[in-house]
Image (cartoon, rainbow, N blue to C red):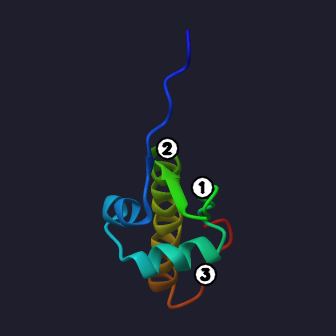
Amino acid sequence: MRKPRKRLLTTKEAAEYLGVSVLTLYRTEKTSALLPYRTPGGHRRYSVEMLDEYLENSRKQSNVSARKARSRTAKGGREVDGV
């Protein structure tokens, strides 16, 4: 029995899924945060799993940044070690 194939999204579909523009998706790729599959014709394809992983990682980074900002504000602008 064959394994079901993953559904791959086009660039436009992936941008809509993430709620960003196609240009922002390209910029994200340039930072190596996303590495899309390429078709034989060179078109980009994104798996839903890849996009979900990117969203989860970006949320974690946002939470860490927010905690650091709150810590600096609470401590008069100085960062506290271990935060």
**Which of the pair 67/51 is nearer the observer?**
51
Looking at the picture, does residue 71 appear above or below residue 59?
below
Count the marks: how many?
3
**Which of the pair 49/9 is nearer the observer?**
9
Q: Position of residue 15 (x, y in %)?
A: 38, 66
Q: Which residue is mark 1?
A: 39
Label 1 vs 3, first from the N-terminus: 1
Q: Quick one: which residue is furthest to the front in this view?
A: 41
Q: What amino acid type is highlighted by mark number 2?
A: Glu
Circle 3: element type:
loop
State the mark number for residue 49. Answer: 2
Looking at the picture, does residue 8 appear above or below residue 34?
above
Q: Is residue 34 left or right of residue 66?
A: right
Label 3 vs label 2: CA separation?
35 Å
Label 2 vs label 1: CA separation?
18 Å
**Which of the pair 37/24 is nearer the observer?**
37
State the mark number for residue 65. Answer: none
Label 2 vs 1, first from the N-terminus: 1
Q: What amino acid type is highlighted by mark number 1?
A: Thr
Alpha-carbon neighbours of circle 3 within 10 Å: few (<14), some, or many (≥20)? some
Circle 2: element type:
helix
Looking at the picture, does residue 20 appear above or below residue 42?
below
Alpha-carbon neighbours of circle 1 within 10 Å: few (<14), some, or many (≥20)? few
Q: Residue at x 49, y 24 (%)?
A: 4
Label 3 vs 2, first from the N-terminus: 2
Q: Which residue is mark 3?
A: 79
User: Is residue 57 visible in this depiction of the protein?
Assistant: no
Q: Residue at x 44, y 65 (%)?
A: 11
